Image (spheres, rainbow, N blue to C red):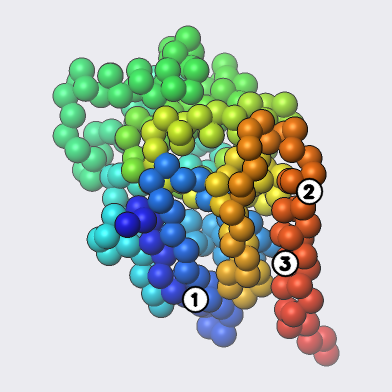
Amino acid sequence: MPRIDIRSIGLGYGTRRVLNGVDMSVRRGELVAVLGPSGSGKSTLLRIVAGLLKPDAGSVMIDGQALAGPRPDIALAFQDPCLLPWLSVEKNVAFGLGFKRQPLLSRSARRERVTAALDEVGLAHARHLAPSQLSGGMAQRAALARCLARQPNSLLLDEPFGALDEVTRADMQRLLVKVVRDTQAATLLVTHDIDEALLVSDRVVVLGNQGALILELPVRVPAPREAQVQALGALRVQILEALQDSMSRAPRPVHA
């Protein structure tokens, strides 16, 4: 049974379809990257899986149960780390563990979770720092640690590395692969970067215009993937061809 099972999801606003019959699934410990042009519904799909937005067609099943709203075992991270500036890194990571939907934890249990999350992302040394003292990469690690402290079964990431420089981004990509391997969370990564998708994911799905799934591509490339230029290049061509075909089929705007 897939941990995340997306069944014929559709959503529209008036006559505009944002998502159109999307079917896909994510297994335990699998990282699936979602690509597509702007307006193809990538972030909307992520918010539906997070339980923050209700589709007008289809359903989402989490571990065999219909999703009816936000769940404590689903964590969502955005491009902006959204760290609270008046809290230390440690307290930012702990933020939310006492919320109503979260399991009731003792103070020592919370501290253990926070420590384990900081260790996982390599920020144990920075636990007492303020967000203003962090680099961009460290801030994203803190945001990821905040997700991990919840011990999620499903991890949803909306372009989390888009604002980082190339070197820091590569470090975060390697960290993400390690985190998914260590935690076995079913992971959906929305990205606009084809190379990033091919470097980190087990599978790539591509949404086209009108929010339809136009390609699902397994990435069976051995590590280190950075060295597999020819294999990655062939997959990149398939993705670009699918996107170009989708763009050519898109309805053209009518001008008066």
The amino acid type found where label 3 is placed reads Ala
- Please state if 227 lies on the left or on the right of 2 as rendered: right
Q: What element carries label 3?
A: helix
Residue 107 position, x and y percent, is: 20, 21
Q: What residue is rendered at 35% in x and 18% in y? A: 115
Quadrant in which residue 95 is drawn: top left
Q: Which residue lies furthest to the top in this view?
A: 125
Q: Distance between the residues labelled 2 and 3?
A: 14 Å
Q: How many numbered circles are shown?
A: 3
Q: Where is residue 102 drawn, in percent x and y?
A: 23, 40
Q: Which amino acid does label 1 sit on?
A: Gly
Which sits in the foreground, 105 or 92? 105
Residue that label 3 marks:
242
Q: Which of marks 2 and 3 is nearer the N terminus?
A: 2
SS at mark 2? helix
Instruction: Tell me: 68 left or right of 30.
Output: left
In this view, 69 is above or below 145: below
**Label for residue 233?**
2
Vertically, is 82 above or below 122? below
Which residue is identified by label 1?
Answer: 21
Mark 2: amino acid: Gly
In this rendering, the answer to whether 100 lies above or below 20 is above
x, y percent for residue 157: 51, 45
Residue 42 shows up from this direction: yes
Please give the name of the residue rendered at 47% of the width and 9% of the height, measured from the top-left corner: 125
Q: Which of 123 and 136 is in front in this view?
A: 123
Mark toward the start of the polypeptide (1 vs 2): 1
Residue at the image position 47 percent from the left and 69 percent from the top? 23
Residue at 73% x, 46% y is 232
Examine the rendered structure and indicate whether residue 157 appears above or below residue 68. Answer: above
Measuring from the top left, give residue 216's x and y in whole percent: 59, 62
